[in-house]
Amino acid sequence: MQVCNVCREQTPKYKCPTCKIRYCSVGCYKKHKDSCLPVQPPEPSGPEVKPASSSDPWSVEDLLNEDDIIDKVPVEKLQLLGRSDQLRDLLRNPHLRQLLRSVDAADSKEDAMKAAMQEPLFVEFSDCCLNIVEDGTAPTHT
């Protein structure tokens, strides 16, 4: 399992767009940005990470570019995920939780998702999530 390159304590959730190191929080990003050196030029098509000031918290829009906005799911629909009994039942499966952790920790999210989509359990999880956010309903167990 990876650890944050700044605090070396938490699991990293973000990657610096400039130097590609992984970090876990806004606080670690703020500490890192003063010593950040680019490894390669930033990719213009990727999301731009903006540091938050102490009075201005991050929002989803800070991590999205204009092309990503069309795929943004409203918060109200995302909250439906937390209320789904079927999704909660699926997430009790340790194999699914491990699959989700491996996708989250992967350097190449696209490759990790392709591999995970070969697993019927992951496909069931994905379908359940999509049905909830698209229709506002969860599919029934078969």
Image (tube, rainbow, N blue to C red):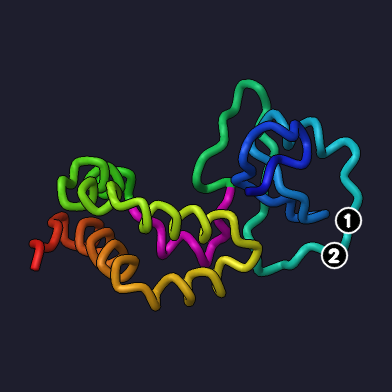
What are the residue bounds of the magenta stretch?
63-73
Q: Nearer the viewer, residue 23 or 124?
A: 124
* Disc 2 secondary structure class: loop
What residue type is disc 2 on?
Pro
Q: Mark 1 points at which residue?
A: 38
The reply to whether dot 1 and dot 2 touch (C-beta < 8 Å) is: yes
Asked whether residue 135 is drawn in magenta, I would say no
**Rendered location of residue 101, percent (x, y):** 49, 53
Residue drawn at 59 percent across, 55 percent down: 105
- Compared with 109, 17 (above or below) is above
Q: Nearer the viewer, residue 16 or 44?
A: 16
Mark 1 is surrounded, within 10 Å at the Cα level, by few (under 14), some (14 to 19) or many (20 or more) other residues, namely: few
**Rendered location of residue 20, percent (x, y):** 77, 55
* Disc 1 secondary structure class: loop
**Rendered location of residue 61, percent (x, y):** 52, 48
Between the residue at mark 1 and the residue at mark 2, the CA separation in whole angstroms equals 7 Å
What residue type is disc 1 on?
Pro
Q: Is residue 22 left or right of residue 41?
A: left
- Compared with 91, 82 (above or below) is above
Instruction: Tally the marks.
Output: 2
